[in-house]
Amino acid sequence: MGFYSDIILPRLCDFAMRNKLLVPIRERVIGAAEGRVLEIGVGSGRNLPFYRPPAREVLALEPAAKLVTMARSASRGNIMPVSFLEASAEAIPLEDHCVDTIVTTWTMCSIPHAEAALAEMRRVLRPSGRLLFAEHGRAPDESVQRWQDRLTPAWRCIAGGCHLNRPIRSMIEGAGFRVDRIETGYIPGPRPMTYMYEGSARPN
């Protein structure tokens, strides 16, 4: 889904990262990263092989120790230097305005306090930097929204805290970013779980 061969996974986001249909999306998002990059919720490291210059360094943030171990293994042999931060997105252990690009892919759905995390992202991003995102979230169709709202309480319990109904664009803009590119739409799969947002934003 987010972008799951098996929908019932520990994290909805992990299905997104495994779906081969999503590889072009991942390539676009990761391929646009530049300079010092902070990836939020690196998970098991499925994005890491896609980093290339003009990115020069990846700071891989992930709160789950088991996933950090998996991501370290996935990073072996990468051409891009990768440093791991075992920490929460709501309290990023970096100084202000120190990264050029922030990447989030199918992560905002499961961060417990997403607004606080976005505020932290804005804090560590340089004024000239960009937030690159590919996320699933609230659909524009009222009938789908109703299902998203009904399903989310149970879905959070079986999918690692994933919310189906988060309004990604308005969350990003509400945290002090200006969206300068966005593409939205459904990908194949159950509609409550497959409305995607892909784009970039800059600090206001």
Image (spheres, rainbow, N blue to C red):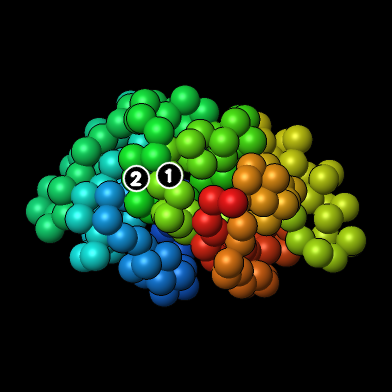
Q: Height in image: 158 above or below 9?
A: above
Nearest the viewer among 52 and 130 is 130
Q: Position of residue 64 (x, y in %)?
A: 39, 29
Of the residues under marks 2 and 1, which one precedes in the sequence? 2
Badge 2 is on which residue? 99
Q: Height in image: 152 above or below 3?
A: above
Badge 1 is on which residue? 125
Circle 2 packing at 10 Å, graded few (<14), some (14-19), many (20+), is many
Q: Position of residue 129 (x, y in %)?
A: 42, 54
Please tell me which residue is depicted at 36% across the width and 26% down the height of the picture. Answer: 93
Nearest the viewer among 59 and 177 is 177
Mark 2 is on which residue type? Val
Q: Height in image: 173 above or below 29?
A: above
Q: Secondary structure at mark 1?
A: strand
Q: Position of residue 178 (x, y in %)?
A: 61, 57
- Disc marking residue 10: none
Q: CA distance from mark 2 to mark 1?
A: 5 Å
Q: Position of residue 115 (x, y in %)?
A: 64, 36
Please tell me which residue is depicted at 54% across the width and 51% down the height of the picture. Answer: 203
